[in-house]
Image: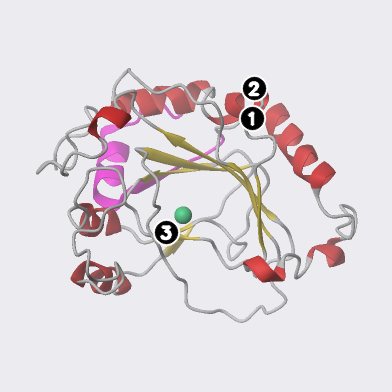
C-alpha cells in the first residue's frame, strides 16, 4: 500500500512537485481501459500488429486523447475511486474533495517513426485543479512516451499568476514563455517518467510538464484525472496566497 505517504514522500512532493507511486491501479479496470480505447481506435491500427502502431496520429505529435467514455462509472472508479489514490489525495488536500462527473480521459502516445532524441517542451495547464494524476494502464519503458516533468517548476510558476488556480499570467502583456520563471525552468533537466502498468504519477497543478517522446515500439497508455478540493470554485480566482501550500493541510509549508 502507498498510503499514508511517508514524511519523505510528502517532502519529495513538496520540493519537486511530483511523486511516483507503484502498483496502485486495479488490474481489471486497467484491462477494461485498454479494451475501451482499442475498440474505438481507427481500424488501420491492428492490436496484434505492432508495426501498425508506429507513426499513428502524426498530426497531433503521435498523441491521441480519447475522452468519449470518460464519464462512465468504471473510468471514474479507476482513478477517483481508487482507495489508495483517494486516501493520498485526502492526506495532502484534506477530507473534502470534489466529486467528479468525469476523468480527463485515456491519453495514448504512439511510437514515433523518428527514434532520435529531441528536446522536450513544457507547458502549464490552463484549467483549475489541485493534484494531477497520470496513471499507466500498460507498461511504459524508458523513452516510451512517459509523462515528462520539470522538477521544482511548480515553485517557479506559482507566483507568476494573478490567481491561485485559474490561468491568469501576472505579466499579462507578455506571453507566459517570455518571463524569468520560464527561462529558469528551461535550465531544469526534465524527468521522463516510466514504469509498469498500475503505476501513477502525482503532480502539482502549476508544474511544467509535457507529453513524452515515444521512442519505444509500444503504445504509451495513460489515464488522467485531476483531484480538486470541494472549495476550488470559491478560491480559484483569489490571488495566490503567500504560502503556496495553504490549501494542502498534509504538507508542511516548506
Ligand atoms: Fe498539460
Check disc 2: other Cα within 10 Å, few if <14, some if 14-19, many if 20+: few
Q: Position of residue 131 (x, y in %)?
A: 38, 38
Query: Can you tell which quarter of the image residue 227 is in?
Result: top left
Query: What coloring was used for the rendering?
Result: secondary structure
Q: Is mark 3 within 8 Å of ligand 1?
A: yes
Q: Is residue 4 visible?
A: no
- SS for callout 2: helix
In the picture, the disc for residue 75 is: 1
Please provide the residue range marked out in magenta: 1-23
Relative height, residue 62 to residue 103 (above, below) = below
Check whether the beta carbons of the residues at disc 2 and disc 1 lie within 8 A of each other.
yes
The reply to whether discs 2 and 3 touch (Cβ–Cβ < 8 Å) is no
Q: What residue sits 38% from the left and 28% below the top?
A: 89
Q: Is mark 1 within 8 Å of ligand 1?
A: no
Q: Is residue 5 magenta?
A: yes
Q: Taking 44 as reference, is 248 above or below it?
A: above
Compute the Cα span from label 2 to label 3. Answer: 28 Å
Name the residue tied to disc 3: 209
Q: Secondary structure at mark 1?
A: helix
From the viewer's perspective, tell me whether residue 82 is left or right of residue 219.
left
Q: Position of residue 250 (x, y in %)?
A: 24, 28
Give the residue drawn at x 19%, y 64%: 171
Label disc, if present, on residue 104 of the rendered structure? none
Position of the C terminus by quadrant: top left
Q: Which residue is mark 2?
A: 73
Q: Nearer the viewer, residue 111 or 181?
A: 181
**Would you call the spot at circle 3 few (<14 residues within 10 Å), some (14-19), or many (20 or more)?**
many
Badge 1: few (under 14), some or many (20 or more) residues near its Cα, within 10 Å?
Answer: many
Comparing labels 2 and 3, the label whose residue is closer to the camera: 2
Q: Position of residue 14 (x, y in %)?
A: 25, 44
**How far, Cα to Cα, is label 1 from label 3?**
23 Å
Q: CA distance from mark 2 to mark 1?
A: 5 Å
Amino acid at each position: 500500500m502507498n498510503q499514508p505517504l511517508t514524511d519523505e514522500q510528502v517532502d519529495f512532493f513538496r520540493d519537486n512537485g511530483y511523486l511516483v507511486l507503484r502498483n496502485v491501479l486495479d488490474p481489471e479496470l486497467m484491462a477494461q481501459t485498454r479494451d475501451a480505447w482499442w475498440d474505438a481506435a481507427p481500424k488501420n491500427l491492428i492490436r496484434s500488429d505492432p508495426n501498425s502502431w508506429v507513426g499513428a496520429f502524426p498530426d497531433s505529435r503521435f498523441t491521441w486523447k480519447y475522452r468519449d467514455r470518460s464519464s462512465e462509472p468504471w473510468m471514474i472508479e479507476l482513478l477517483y475511486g481508487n482507495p489508495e489514490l483517494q486516501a493520498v489525495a485526502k492526506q495532502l488536500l484534506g477530507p473534502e474533495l470534489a466529486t467528479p462527473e468525469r476523468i480527463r480521459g485515456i491519453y495514448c502516445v504512439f511510437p514515433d517513426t523518428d527514434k532520435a532524441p529531441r528536446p522536450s517542451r513544457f507547458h502549464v495547464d490552463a484549467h483549475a485543479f489541485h493534484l494531477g494524476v497520470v496513471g499507466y494502464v500498460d507498461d511504459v519503458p524508458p523513452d516510451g512516451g512517459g509523462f515528462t516533468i520539470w522538477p521544482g517548476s511548480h515553485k517557479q510558476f506559482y507566483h507568476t499568476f494573478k490567481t491561485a488556480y485559474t490561468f491568469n499570467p501576472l505579466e499579462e502583456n507578455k506571453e507566459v514563455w517570455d518571463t524569468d520563471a520560464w527561462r529558469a525552468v528551461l535550465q531544469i533537466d526534465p524527468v521522463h517518467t516510466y514504469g509498469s502498468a498500475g503505476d501513477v504519477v502525482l503532480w502539482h497543478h502549476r508544474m511544467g510538464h509535457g507529453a513524452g517522446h515515444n521512442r519505444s515500439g509500444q503504445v504509451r497508455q495513460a489515464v488522467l484525472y485531476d483531484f480538486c478540493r470541494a472549495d476550488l470554485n470559491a478560491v480559484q480566482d483569489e490571488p495566490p496566497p503567500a504560502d503556496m501550500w495553504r490549501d494542502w493541510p498534509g504538507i508542511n509549508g516548506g
